[in-house]
Image (tube, rainbow, N blue to C red):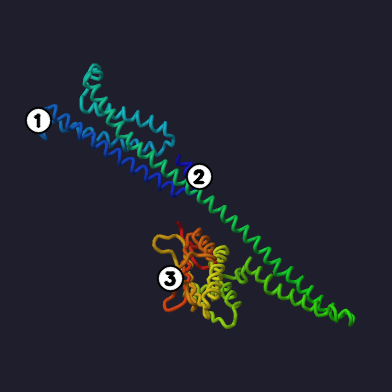
């Protein structure tokens, strides 16, 4: 079972620590039972003698029982670590219990003849020792077996979680590949073809003879202008929605590109914390691309809502990355989007467009809240755990 545990987790050190913990707990349970057995034996011996004199030899029955039992527990623990199959462990433990019971009998009832060995008194003392020691070892083994099953179940669940996480990562990677491919095709091939067609329509309108130009020239120029508007307003926007501009460079660059696309009458600013500012100055992306897109799309939705529903004229995005705290094992990206619009009503209504973003954030262990900003306006707060990408300069945290 221990070997399967190592195979499931792929980590030998945690499995070794878990096995040692089980051995210590099982040994402690066995020792407690040996002590209880020794106390009971002493009590029975003293009562049988009818007196409670500490100098009476009856008091030594418990001492012998205790010492022999502790030696037995130590020997069985050593054998337990060598043997890995439960049938062999139980068989050897039963044999050692019988041997130690015989040792206890010999110490308590010195043997002088063969008849003494098979006398009813000797058999009774030996049987009592076997039952007491076997019960003590059995209790310890039962606890060890239960703990081992618990560890194996925990390892199985951990392996399932890791397989699920790997499958999710594969799906996200495939989604990103398709998004990038379609966005590149829209941004490159489709827009280029639209430009060529628009230029061709303009050229055709100029080259038409006067009667045809009078009839079709204006319409051809309108079609060319419509194609230009389609390219600028629809194809380019669709390409951005599929894969935000600047996302390959980093979260901060993508957010700045997003804010630069807003109307000129909207004041925008990006305020970075010291850690993220240092990374941005060195042009280092810290969030994995999938987490990066979650942040950018959420900020974009917040800005859109602030302008569309709140009538905002100023938007400020504050962002920082923080090291793990409170026992967490991952870094955290903390983003706050403030605006000077009307803000959400009190109480805040259920999310609409932001709901899908919140679902994604929660699925990654984060949180997304919307509320009123101090003074006036709205505030969206995004907290997203992440594992830093290699080369970002942030040390990964071991679980």
- Mark pair 3, 1: CA separation: 82 Å
Give the camera-side residue of 82 and 240: 240
**Residue at 29 percent of width and 34 percent of height:** 136
Q: Quickly name the residue at label 2.
A: 7
Please identify the quarter of the rendering in which residue 213 is found.
bottom right
Res. 320 visible in picture: no
Q: Earlier in the sequence, mark 1 or mark 2?
A: 2
Q: Residues within 10 Å of mark 2 (few under 14, many from 20)?
A: few
State which mark lies toward you, 3 or 2.
3
Secondary structure at badge 1 equals: loop
**Left or right of 111 in this view: 188:** right
Res. 51 mark: 1
Q: Residues within 10 Å of mark 1 (few under 14, many from 20)?
A: few
Please identify the quarter of the rendering in which residue 71 is found.
top left
Give the camera-side residue of 162 and 223: 223
Q: Quickly name the residue at label 3.
A: 346
């Amino acid at each position: 079972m221990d070997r399967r545990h190592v195979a499931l987790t792929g980590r030998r050190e945690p499995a070794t620590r878990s096995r040692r913990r089980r051995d210590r707990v099982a040994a402690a349970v066995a020792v407690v039972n040996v002590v209880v057995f020794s106390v009971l034996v002493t009590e029975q011996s003293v009562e049988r003698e009818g007196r409670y004199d500490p100098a009476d030899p009856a008091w030594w029955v418990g001492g012998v029982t205790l010492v022999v039992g502790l030696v037995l527990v130590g020997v069985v623990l050593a054998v337990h670590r060598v043997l890995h199959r439960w049938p062999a462990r139980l068989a050897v433990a039963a044999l050692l219990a019988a041997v130690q019971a015989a040792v206890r009998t010999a110490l308590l009832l010195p043997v002088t003849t063969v008849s003494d060995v098979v006398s009813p008194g000797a058999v009774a003392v030996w049987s009592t020792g076997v039952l007491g020691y076997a019960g003590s070892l059995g209790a310890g083994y039962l606890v060890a077996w239960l703990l081992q099953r618990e560890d194996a179940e925990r390892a199985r669940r951990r392996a399932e979680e890791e397989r699920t996480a790997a499958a999710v990562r594969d799906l996200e990677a495939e989604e990103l590949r398709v998004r990038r491919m379609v966005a590149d095709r829209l941004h490159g091939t489709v827009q280029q073809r639209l430009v060529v067609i628009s230029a061709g329509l303009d050229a055709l309108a100029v080259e038409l003879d006067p009667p045809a130009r009078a009839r079709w020239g204006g319409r051809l120029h309108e079609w060319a202008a419509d194609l230009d508007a389609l390219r600028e307003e629809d194809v380019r926007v669709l390409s951005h929605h599929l894969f935000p501009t600047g996302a390959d460079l980093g979260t901060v660059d993508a957010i700045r590109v997003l804010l630069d696309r807003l109307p000129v009458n909207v004041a925008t600013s990006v305020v970075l914390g010291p850690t993220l500012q240092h990374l941005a100055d060195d042009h280092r992306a810290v969030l994995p691309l999938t987490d990066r897109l979650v942040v950018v799309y959420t900020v974009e939705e917040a800005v859109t809502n602030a302008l569309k529903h709140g009538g905002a004229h100023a938007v400020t995005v504050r962002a920082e990355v923080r090291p793990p705290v409170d026992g967490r094992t991952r870094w955290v990206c903390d983003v706050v989007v403030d605006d000077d619009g009307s803000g959400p009503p009190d109480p805040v209504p259920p999310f609409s467009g932001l709901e899908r973003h919140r679902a994604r954030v929660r699925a990654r262990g984060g949180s997304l809240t919307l509320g009123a900003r101090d003074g006036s306006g709205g505030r969206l707060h995004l907290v997203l755990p992440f594992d830093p990408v290699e080369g970002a300069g942030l040390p990964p945290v071991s679980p």
